[in-house]
Amino acid sequence: MASGAAERVTAAVLIIGDEILSGRTQDTNLRDIARYLGTFGIDLAEARVVPDILPEIVDALNALRARYDYVVTTGGIGPTHDDITADAVAAAFGVELEEHPEILAMMQARWAGELNPARRRMARVPKGGALVKNPVQGPPGFTIGNVFVLAGVPAIMRGMLQDVGPRMRPGAVTISRTVRVEGSGEGAIAAPLEAVARAHPAMSLGSYPFYGQEGYGSNLVLRGRDPAEIEATVAELVGVLKAAGIANVREVEAS
């Protein structure tokens, strides 16, 4: 498992479900996970969406968990026949699925002991796995190895996340600053932007154009872990842009 530089901790998200790929359901979990992990200094480095097909889930999960420090999956842990995430995770780790006694007890209390086969599916956890608390409703998620398996329903997923962050090794928090250029297109700023980016390879420097009634331009977002370098690079970028004849440049609040 690779984590890059010592201060960098990485994660990937695996979104599971035909409904996402068909467009019937709009995913918001990726955004929420990225923002949440960022508060722990954990970089979301990759995201994949896969259908409800067991071999594809297994292949994607094995690739991601080998490459990144952590993997968070969403979706596919409900009671229906196409909820196969638990099966896929168990297959990826080469272990059996077991009915977790704590989940069974929880569901028996909720449904007065009436557990049909569909409900019992939600009690299955890969052998050796541990539970992820669900403070919203329904059974918990689970974790095994460096993988955290969460629900697909956004409100439930966000609740489960609160039990995930503290279990992860924190990294150095990324600092973000934004320089706004108004009245100039990306073609005009490309060369000075590239020069600054090349001079600071450890940082991320991206251009995000905007268009509207107020005009057009770009938000130039700088991201890095060294506060001193961020501060110096913001000043350098503003200076380089102005030297290139781009006058309407200013720093705005961190994005």
Image (cartoon, helix red, strand yellow):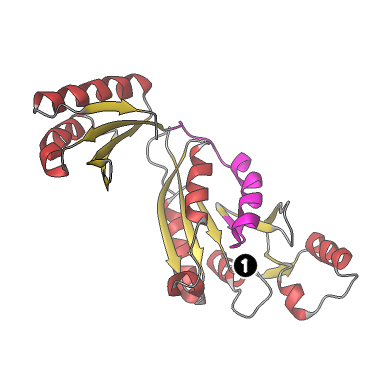
Q: Is residue 217 above or below residue 79?
A: above
Q: Is residue 115 magenta?
A: no
Instruction: Answer left or right for 137 relative to 57.
Output: right
Question: In the picture, residue 109 is in which quadrant?
Answer: bottom right
What is the x, y in percent for residue 137? 74, 59
Q: Is residue 215 above or below residue 95?
A: above
What is the x, y in percent for residue 33? 52, 49
Q: Quadrant of the C terminus?
A: top left
Amino acid at circle 1: Val
- What residue range appears in magenta? 148-173
Residue 209 or residue 52, whichever sits in front: 209
Label 1 sits on residue: 95
Q: Is residue 133 above or below residue 42?
A: below
Q: Residue at x 83, y 75 (%)?
A: 115
What is the x, y in percent for residue 166? 62, 39
Q: Residue at x 48, y 35 (%)?
A: 41
Residue 127 or residue 194, whichever sits in front: 194
Disc 1 residue crowd, few under 14, some 14–19, many 20+, Cα 10 Å:
some
What is the x, y in percent for residue 3? 42, 43
